[in-house]
Image (cartoon, grey):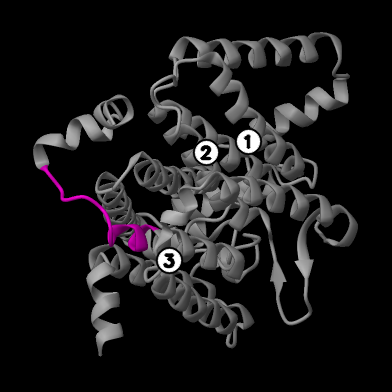
Amino acid sequence: MDLVKKVGLNIDWYLFLATIPLLGAGLVTMNSFVGESIFFERQIIWILIGFGVFFLASLVDWRFLRRTWVSVLLFLVSTGLLITLFVAGQVTKGAISWFDFGAFSLQPSDPIKIFLIIILAKYFSRRHVEIANFRHLLVSGFYALTIFLLVLLQPDFGSAIIIFMIWLGLVLVSGISKKHLFLVLLVGLLSMVLLWSFVFVPYQKDRILTFLNPLTDTSGAGYNALQSTIAVGSGQLTGKGIGYGTQSRLEFLPEYETDFVFAAFSEEWGFIGVIILFSLFGVLFWRILLSALHGATNFEILFGLGVSIFLISHFIIHVGMNIGLLPVTGTTVPFLSYGGSHIVTEFLALGILMGMRRYGKAYHKEDTKNEFLGVERMIGN
């Protein structure tokens, strides 16, 4: 009973309960088109494991993550795992992104996103007084770039983009000089212009253009994007009903359990269902940000903000990809898509956040604005 009480005191139940209908929506969607779905059964197992990870993580005192050796170890583990993939990884659809253990597979790029959040939160939290120094932009960029390149070489462009977004988001909220950030981004943009003008050959340019706008090649690379936008639009106001999504049932829409689960859901539930889905994600993101503002130190605040950036980036990129506004990158949507690695990783991130609530500060409304913008806490502690 004491353990149950201890767990209950740490948990933001609004946050946890917001995940339940999201998980349910994913289960219903992936089970709508077949009599017996192996994805449905496996997803239930991963959800139960995710719940266990969430509640166990909420009991841990995570203050040890502030120590330098932890960040160094996580960086070495991250790079080691990604390098090992090229030797012992399983090739799936042309990408070496998974370790195959027989009974289950592991995609290391998922937990490594959490490792990167911890590494960057640690780095920025220790340097808030001199954060405007250009050196910190370069050092933090080195950590993120190393992981980014190793993921990109698999190739896993979707995860690489999320890793970049985590770095960029934490750079923006940490207080680093925006002039320095603009300079780095300008150099990157100029590099792409030079590559486009003098290095890339015509067929490479065609591939990039098709990637950026897949609907220009609807019979080839843009086929998936076309079928996804058709599925979303055909849902109209109230949807076609559970199990009556023709794009998915007739197998026009590929990967409806993972990369295009939002499109499959939209076709069945329509605009009204999408509004409800967005509202649930809104509650989830709001509660994560609120927990971040309760952080005991800069590290906990930055970690919470990093988790929100991580999940929001997944959500925006997945939805944008499904409605034809963003390139198809194979990005899952939190709690909705099939997959054990990302489900367990997401619950681990939330569980760590709940564990940090145990020693978080009291919430003061008058401090919310300054803390959210990273002003008082970044220069005043």
Q: Which is more toward the observer, 56 or 257?
A: 56
Q: Which is more toward the observer, 63 or 252?
A: 63
Q: Residue at x 72, y 32 (%)?
A: 210
Q: Which residues are magenta?
A: 353-364
User: Is residue 241 something one can see in this rendering?
Assistant: no
Judging by the rendered image, the residue that carries numbered circle 3 is 268
Looking at the image, how many numbered discs can be counted on the residues? Answer: 3
Crowding near pointer 2: few (<14 within 10 Å), some, many (20+)?
Answer: many
Q: In the picture, residue 237 is in which quadrant?
A: bottom left
Give the CA separation, mark 2 to mark 3: 40 Å
Judging by the rendered image, the residue that carries numbered circle 2 is 120
Q: Quadrant of the C terminus?
A: top left
Q: Amino acid at mark 1?
A: Ala
Q: Is residue 17 left or right of residue 57?
A: left
Extreme residue toward the bottom, this view: 1
Q: Residue at x 48, y 43 (%)?
A: 313
The first of marks 3 and 1 along the sequence is: 1
The local secondary structure at tag 2 comes to helix
Q: Is residue 34 above or below residue 221?
A: below
Q: In the picture, residue 146 is in which quadrant?
A: top right
The local secondary structure at tag 1 comes to helix
Residue 235 magenta-highlighted: no
